[in-house]
Amino acid sequence: AIDIRELRSSSGYITLDSGFMNTGSCCSSITFLDGEEGILSYRGYGIEDLAENCTFVEVAYLLDHGNLPTREELSKFSQMLGKYAMVHEDMIRFFDGYPPNSPPMAILSSMVNSLCSFYPEMLDNPLENIDKMAARLLSKVRTIAAFSYKKSMGQPLVYPRHDLSYCANFLNMMFDSPVKPYEINDTVVKALNKLLILHGDHEQNCSTATVRVAGSARVNLYASISAGINALWGPLHGGANQAVMEMLTQIHEEGGNYKQFIAKAKDPADPFRLVGFGHRVYKTHDPRARIIKKACDDVLTALNISDPLLDIAKELEEVALKDEYFIARNLYPNVDFYSGIIYRAIGIPTNMFTVMFALGRLPGWIAHWKEMWDDPDWRISRPRQVYVGPKRRPFVPLAERT
Ligand code: ACO
């Protein structure tokens, strides 16, 4: 317990809000989120409408520009994405320096940070060049993600193609090979678009807040986003999608007894949590999880796949939602609970799941960095603390210390 007097600092009283549960850090016109009602919209458009009717590129444009693109704007934006899809050949050599089995998120954050060395001309007037920087990031992160997968598989790189859409291009770079050409499947492309749209932005989540905090020191967009990628990596945030699949796989391999895992999650003496459950803001169903659950059924049916992990996930959800422990704490499945099953169905390996989340969250990070940079009320982020260490102590010289 902290003595209230400790909250007083040289500049008055400090609000202590651990985890920023109730602290607003900015005004934003990007994403609206109502955690009690389960409502999510980007720039005023409901997430359900966007996920059903748009491509990821349209939604990226919406998040970063404030409006849905006209046909002409979309065509211009798509051309930019095509133009910037390549990664500098010198950067491609970076991949050779990583040991096998390097975490893809470590590679991604380093590569994104390195972009500012290759495109330094963007750094002087960031807002004048923001469209170019955004297109570079959206396009190159996709290429870097696919290349890092190919490298990890020891397969030759597949370069981006001009004739393919954003998601089809990514899938082709991931799965095409000289021995087995990749066939683009519309169901898979649609599912990937949906997943990326649903991850597009989520107001002041941990990684977005990190992008803003880093950027508030006036660090460049690439470095700020690299910081966000590292925050996303955590298993309590974006890393949860990988952790969910590992948990479901473990349940499956141990005979499917999910009730044992529910009991473990409820045990106050056990730190285990049911991954993919609970959310800081949603105290009801996460609207993204509802859409993803339905998409999961659609994709698996269309691809004629029967995945025992989906059955376990559904049964686990049904039982948990009726359990007093989960009801009392408002714990519902979050966006990560079903997304991994779709990624698995379309062939994305588990250790790439958080990279996929990063790809989807990019437009949100860019939009927030831009909004923060342009804010007339901008100030460097510098929270205070409540000091709880020792009071002033007499100094003891080295020779006298015991
Ligand atoms: N399983 C079991 N119990 C849980 C879970 C869970 N997944 N999540 C929260 N609880 C319990 C806590 O033990 C705590 O119980 P108590 O009051 O008896 O101590 C209570 O619910 C509140 O939990 P907090 O940790 O205080 O909630 P917070 O808002 O800080 O955490 C978080 C939210 C991190 C998402 C949490 O629910 C969690 O760890 N979930 C699992 C990881 C996960 O799925 N993360 C992805 C989140 S979505 C995203 O980032 C994209």
Image: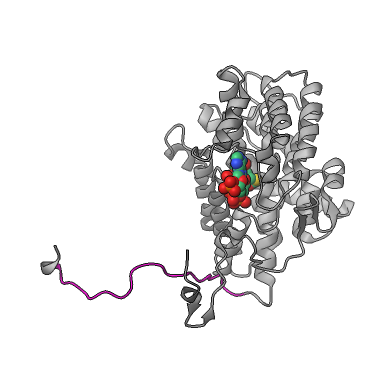
Q: Is residue 374 visible?
A: yes
Q: Is residue 388 above or below residue 174?
A: below
Image-based side of 57 in relation to 316, left or right: right
Which image quarter: residue 400? bottom left
Residue 120 inside the magenta-drawn segment: no
Q: Position of residue 316 (x, y in %)?
A: 68, 28
Q: How is the image coloured?
A: one colour
Q: Position of residue 98 (x, y in %)?
A: 44, 38
Q: Residue at x 51, y 27 (%)?
A: 154
Q: Position of residue 276 (x, y in %)?
A: 64, 38
Residue 390 inside the magenta-drawn segment: yes
Q: Residue at x 74, y 30 (%)?
A: 318
Placement of the C terminus among the 4 image quadrants: bottom left
Q: Is residue 358 visible?
A: no
Of 204 and 106, nearer the camera is 204
Task: Give the extent of the magenta segment.
Answer: 379-398
Which image quarter: residue 144? top right
- Residue at the limit of the structure toward the front, as seen here: 324
Of 159 and 252, nearer the camera is 252
Ligand 1 resides in the quarter of the picture at top right
Q: Position of residue 297 (x, y in %)?
A: 79, 27
- Residue at the limit of the structure toward the left, as seen here: 399
Q: Main secondary structure of the magenta part?
A: loop
